Structure formats: structure tokens, C-alpha cells
Image: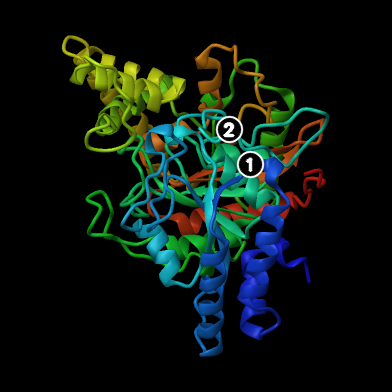
């Protein structure tokens, strides 16, 4: 048996049911690992006393014969989720001290199912970032290391990725607005699933871009993601974008048999200057799926080249609207005023103090593209292009393609601080392979499939049909078995 905190969710579930381990023992092992991993800065609000109480309650339920899949499983929760009476501040100074009097639907479902919350995980401020460097808590650190540098775990769900990769928890929640689950999963050698938009409730998750945000699981393998999705998904009348659709058993879909499936390779994802090792991994993934019995075909998604600029019009526009509520009056931190300051000074000082530079940048971009005179030129045009991007996917799925294989990221993890002086667009390019999935509302998953020449993990992305996460997870399961990625970071923290 693995060290308790290193167990996978499925392994721990089976051990709990057999009485080989208790939830309290699992939780204590994770709490010990968290205390010893302060160098990773992954957990930013720890709740050990609450976690042990939840674990004791789970053990009692197991003893009474309950068998929920997540009963007694210790998980980490991204700081974007509101959790009752616990700090929930989206890694932003403006929400310092915020303790919601309500629970997000997803975390509520996980707790009803008996999962144990270990605390809140680091992230980019309001989920805006690709390296976890915009967090008010300071950056989370990737447990993978190849030299003296500290590496980014990706963003925005960087704390979730770091915590899972370093075995501080058995799984974690993330959110994905443009790749914020899949990119950090690829950077840390774990598996991350962005479900179909509307599959998991967004109620109680602090909003970034409401038409793009989606909650999802991050775990050590595909099966664990399927188990977590079973616990996170479902219709929620509190969320007007939640879909009332069938909720299959996602774990039961994992047969590994993809014979007869058709996998598309989009030619537009082959970018100029793409590293050879990313190209090689993509080709190897194609071969793995062919060897598993799938038919692999070349496809075209012609509007892909417009995806990144479209995303960076729509997402900031929605962010500027969503974040308008944090003004020091209705919500959030309020700046101290000088004698004679008026209400405009109060707004300006409060938002300047409360928001970091990246959030300020995106709010200004969003306000600009929504302003009178530019709304049609930017926002409405972006919405039209988004429709074309979505139609590209609909066309290839209508032609019989079951899933699409692409790289997850254009590179392996880079060093913290290395992009500080880069043009912001350079950082935005980290999302180049993932944003189309959010624009089209599709499910996508990143699976660790290889390492670069320095030994850092690389991921492949599979994109599926809407509402067919079971089929997507099964294809990912076949890819995972073929790739047989077993490397782990060497402990240095």
C-alpha cells in the first residue's frame, strides 16, 4: 500500500470500505504532508480541526455501511469556491477577511457525499493568470524541479495542481475559464478535466467570466477525475446556466476500449515555432490511440487562429462587469480616506488598493471593449467569431469525429519570475491550445503523457462532444494506459 497521502482516490476508497484504513488516518497523513510543504505555498487557508471532525463523521458513516465514493476522501478546495464561514477570497486583497455565510453548490455536494475538506488552495487573483504569480498570497510552487529555479505550477488553479502532484491531498477542485485546470495539470504531471459548460454548478464560485467559467476535478489519474466528477456534477436550480441533463456514472464508462472511435487531429493547432518535443509528443499520442484501435484523421478548425484574441475580448469584458461589485461599498475592502476625499476618491483608492496589476489590466481592457463606440467593433464582433469557432467543432463532430487530440500547452513549466518583464501577450499564449474549448463550451481533459528533455512533465489534451464526458474520459483512460506516465517529482520541499 502507498503512503496514505500518496494514495489515489480509488485506492483509498477501496481501502476505506475494507476497513484497512480510516478517514482520520488518511486526513492526518495529508495534514502532516501539508505542514511539511510550506515551501510549495499551495494551501493558503488550512482547516485541520474542521477536517478531522469531518473525517471522524465519515468514519462513522462508513461504519454504518454507507459507501459513497468520496466518503472520507481528503480533498483540497480552490480559493475561488465559497465555503461556509471559511476564508474565501479568490487570492485577492479586495476580499481579505471575507467569510461567506453560504456554501458553493459543488463543495456542498462534496461534503454531503462525505468528502473531507483540508482547506483552501492558492490560485491566480480572480483566476486571472497562467502562472499563479498574480496571487495576493504569493505564487504557488511546482513540486517538479530540475535546477535551482522554482517553477510555476501553472494557473490559475496552480495551488490545486501543486497540492495534488505533491500528494498533499488526494484530489482537488479547480475552475477553468481558458485552460486553468488543463494547463496546470500538464505542468505538474497530473490529470485535469474541464467539463461541459453547465455540467457543474457555478453557484457560490466567485465569478471571473460567467460565460466561460466551469468547475472541474484535478486528480492523479483519469479514474480519480471520473470519481470526483460524479460528486461535483449535477443540475442546480440556483444556477441559471446549470443544465438539466442526464448524469451518467462517469467511472463506469472507463472500459479502455476505444476500438472504432474516430479521433481528429486539427491542422491549425500546429503552430509555427512549436517546440520539437511538443510535436513529437503529439505524434506519439496519435500513435498510441491508433494502436488502441481508434481511427485517427486530420481535421480542420479554420477559425482557431481567432480564438486567443476573441477570448481576450470576451473574458475581460465579463470580468470588468463581474468585478464592478467590489467597490468598498457593497462588497470588499474599503480604502482609508483622507480628509476631503469624496465618493469618487473612495472608489478609486479602494479598487487601486484591492486589485493587483493583472486584474486592473483586464478590467480596463474589458471596460474599454464594452464602452460606447467600441462595443460593436470589439465585443459584438468577438461574440460572432465565438459562434464560428463553436460551429467548427460542431461540423467535425457531425462528420463523425468522437474526440480531438491536441497538445495541452506550448511548453513545459517555466521558472517563476521569468515572464515578469515579458509582454502580457506572451503569457496569454500559454492558453493557446485550451481557450477554444471554453469558447465552444466543450469538455476537455489534460493527461500526462511524457517528459521534455529536462525531465519535466508534458500533457496531451483530448476535446470531446458536449455532455459526453463519459466517452471523453474513456478515451483519456486509453491514452493514459498507453502513455504509462509514472514519473513523480523528487521531494525537495
Q: What distance separates the C-alpha of mark 2 from that of mark 1?
A: 8 Å
Q: Position of residue 359 (x, y in %)?
A: 41, 25
Identify which residue, 78 or 251, lies in the foreground: 78
Measured as percent of width and height from the top left, residue 363 is found at 34, 22
Q: Residues within 10 Å of mark 1 (few under 14, many from 20)?
A: many
Compared with 381, 135 (above or below) is below
Can residue 242 be spotted in the picture? Answer: yes
Q: In the rendered picture of this protein, how many numbered marks are placed on residues?
A: 2
Mark nearer the N terminus (2 vs 1): 1
Residue at image point 58% right, 57% down: 171
- Would residue 261 be seen by someone viewing this image from the given angle? no
Quarter in which the C terminus is drawn: top right
5 over 80 or under it: above or below = below
Is 193 situated above or below 154?
Answer: below
Q: Nearer the viewer, residue 429 or 289?
A: 429
**Which residue is disc 1 drawn over?**
41
The extreme top residue here reads 373
Q: Could you tell me if the residues under marks 2 and 1 are in contact, i.e. CB atoms within 8 Å?
A: yes
Image quadrant assignment for residue 22: bottom right
Taking the image as shown, residue 8 lies to the left or right of residue 387, namely right
Q: Which mark is residue 138?
A: 2
The colour scheme of the drawn protein is: rainbow
Residue density around tag 2, few if under 14, some if 14–19, many if 20 or more, within 10 Å: some
Q: Quadrant of residue 101?
A: bottom left
Residue 345's x, y, as percent? 25, 16
Q: In screen coordinates, is 341 left or right of 169?
A: left
Could you tell me which quadrant the N terminus lies in?
Answer: bottom right
Quick one: SS at disc 2? Answer: loop
Q: Residue furthest front?
A: 339
Query: Is 33 in front, or is 296?
Result: 33
Amino acid at each position: 500500500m502507498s503512503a496514505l497521502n500518496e494514495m489515489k482516490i480509488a485506492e483509498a476508497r477501496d481501502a476505506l470500505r475494507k476497513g484497512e484504513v480510516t478517514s482520520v488516518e488518511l486526513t492526518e497523513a495529508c495534514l502532516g504532508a501539508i505542514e511539511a510543504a510550506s515551501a510549495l505555498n499551495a494551501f493558503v487557508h488550512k482547516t485541520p480541526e474542521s477536517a478531522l471532525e469531518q473525517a471522524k463523521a465519515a468514519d462513522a458513516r462508513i461504519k454504518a455501511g454507507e459507501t459513497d465514493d468520496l466518503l472520507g476522501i481528503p480533498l483540497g478546495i480552490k480559493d475561488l469556491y465559497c465555503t461556509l464561514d471559511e476564508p474565501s477570497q479568490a487570492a485577492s486583497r479586495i476580499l481579505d477577511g471575507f467569510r461567506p455565510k453560504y456554501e458553493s453548490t459543488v463543495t456542498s455536494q462534496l461534503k454531503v457525499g462525505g468528502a473531507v475538506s483540508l482547506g483552501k488552495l492558492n490560485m491566480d487573483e480572480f483566476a486571472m493568470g497562467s502562472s499563479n504569480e498574480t496571487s495576493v498570497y504569493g505564487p504557488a510552487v511546482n513540486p517538479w524541479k530540475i535546477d535551482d529555479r522554482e517553477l510555476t505550477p501553472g494557473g490559475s488553479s496552480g495551488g490545486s495542481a501543486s497540492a495534488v502532484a505533491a500528494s498533499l491531498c488526494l484530489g482537488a477542485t479547480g475552475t477553468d475559464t481558458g485552460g486553468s485546470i488543463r494547463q496546470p495539470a500538464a505542468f505538474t504531471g497530473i490529470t485535469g478535466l474541464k467539463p461541459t459548460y453547465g455540467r457543474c454548478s457555478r453557484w457560490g464560485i466567485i465569478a471571473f467570466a460567467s460565460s466561460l467559467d466551469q468547475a472541474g476535478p484535478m486528480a492523479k489519474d483519469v479514474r480519480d477525475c471520473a470519481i470526483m466528477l460524479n460528486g461535483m456534477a449535477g443540475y442546480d436550480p440556483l444556477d441559471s446556466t446549470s443544465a438539466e441533463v442526464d448524469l451518467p456514472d462517469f467511472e463506469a464508462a472507463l472500459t479502455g476500449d476505444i476500438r472504432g472511435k474516430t479521433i481528429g487531429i486539427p491542422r491549425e493547432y500546429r503552430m509555427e515555432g512549436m517546440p520539437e518535443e511538443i510535436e513529437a509528443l503529439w505524434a506519439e499520442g496519435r500513435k498510441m490511440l491508433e494502436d488502441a484501435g481508434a481511427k485517427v484523421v486530420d481535421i480542420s478548425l479554420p477559425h482557431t487562429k481567432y480564438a486567443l484574441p476573441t477570448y481576450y475580448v470576451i473574458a475581460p469584458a465579463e470580468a470588468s462587469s463581474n468585478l464592478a461589485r467590489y467597490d468598498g461599498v457593497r462588497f470588499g475592502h474599503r480604502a482609508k480616506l483622507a480628509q476631503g476625499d469624496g465618493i469618487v476618491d473612495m472608489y478609486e483608492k479602494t479598487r487601486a488598493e484591492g486589485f493587483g496589476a493583472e486584474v486592473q489590466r483586464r478590467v480596463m481592457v474589458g471596460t474599454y471593449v464594452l464602452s460606447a463606440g467600441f462595443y460593436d467593433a470589439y465585443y459584438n464582433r468577438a461574440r460572432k467569431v465565438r459562434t464560428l469557432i463553436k460551429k467548427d467543432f460542431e461540423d467535425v463532430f457531425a462528420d463523425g469525429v468522437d474526440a480531438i487530440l491536441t497538445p495541452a500547452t506550448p511548453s513545459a513549466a517555466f521558472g517563476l519570475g521569468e515572464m515578469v518583464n515579458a509582454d502580457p501577450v506572451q503569457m496569454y499564449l500559454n492558453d493557446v491550445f485550451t481557450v477554444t474549448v471554453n469558447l465552444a463550451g466543450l469538455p476537455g481533459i489534460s493527461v500526462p503523457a511524457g517528459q521534455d528533455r529536462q525531465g519535466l512533465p508534458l500533457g496531451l489534451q483530448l476535446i470531446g462532444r458536449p455532455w459526453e464526458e463519459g466517452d471523453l474520459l474513456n478515451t483519456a483512460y486509453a491514452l493514459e494506459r498507453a502513455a504509462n506516465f509514472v514519473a513523480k517529482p523528487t521531494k525537495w520541499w
